[in-house]
Image: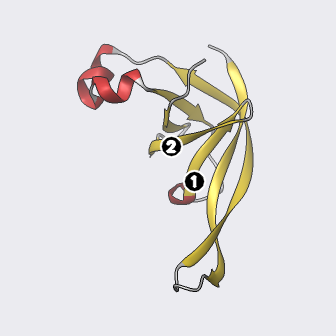
Amino acid sequence: MKYFNAILIEKVSTGEEDELGNEIFEEKEISVKGCRATEWTADDVNVYGRDITTGSRKVLVKPLNEPLKDIVKISINNNKYDILSKKDLGRWILFIVKGFRL
């Protein structure tokens, strides 16, 4: 399995509001090493469905000191991808990433 580096993109509040009263956010980058992309299994296809598994990929990342709920995107080889799902597995964090292919 191939290891690669990635940048996780976290959505952080600036503490300011726009003219409509909506909170303004900025992106904070978190560099991570030793990420892995894995293949879908037949069980995964049954659980997630064909529509998710055909257009996305599972990416495993080593645990972070940042809260997972604020991480919204991942950048791999200077391409940004949306994160559909996040799950802390203990030794790894599982991200289901939309549109990423090796």
Please report the residue visible at 23 percent of the width from the left and 23 percent of the height from the top: 46
Q: Give the residue number, with chain letter if any, for mark 2.
A: 83
Instruction: Point out the image quarter for the N terminus.
Output: top right
Which class describes the residues within 10 Å of circle 1: few (<14), some (14-19), or many (20+)?
Answer: many
- Give how far apart the Cα atoms at labels 2 and 1 are: 8 Å
Horizontal relation, residue 65 to residue 91: left or right: right
- Expressed as whole percent of the image width and height from the top left, the position of residue 10 reads 63, 56
Earlier residue among tags 2 and 1: 1
Considering depth in this image, is 31 or 12 the residue closer to the camera?
Answer: 12
Q: Compared to 18, does 5 lie above or below?
A: above
- Expressed as whole percent of the image width and height from the top left, the position of residue 74 reads 62, 41
Please report the residue visible at 55 percent of the width from the left and 60 percent of the height from the top: 70
- Dot 2 and dot 1 residues touching (CB under 8 Å): yes
Please report the residue visible at 56 percent of the width from the left and 21 percent of the height from the top: 101
Q: Give the residue number, with chain letter if any, for mark 1.
A: 71
Rendering quarter of residue 56: top left
Which amino acid type is shown beneath numbered disc 2? Ile
Please report the residue visible at 64 percent of the width from the left and 67 percent of the height from the top: 12
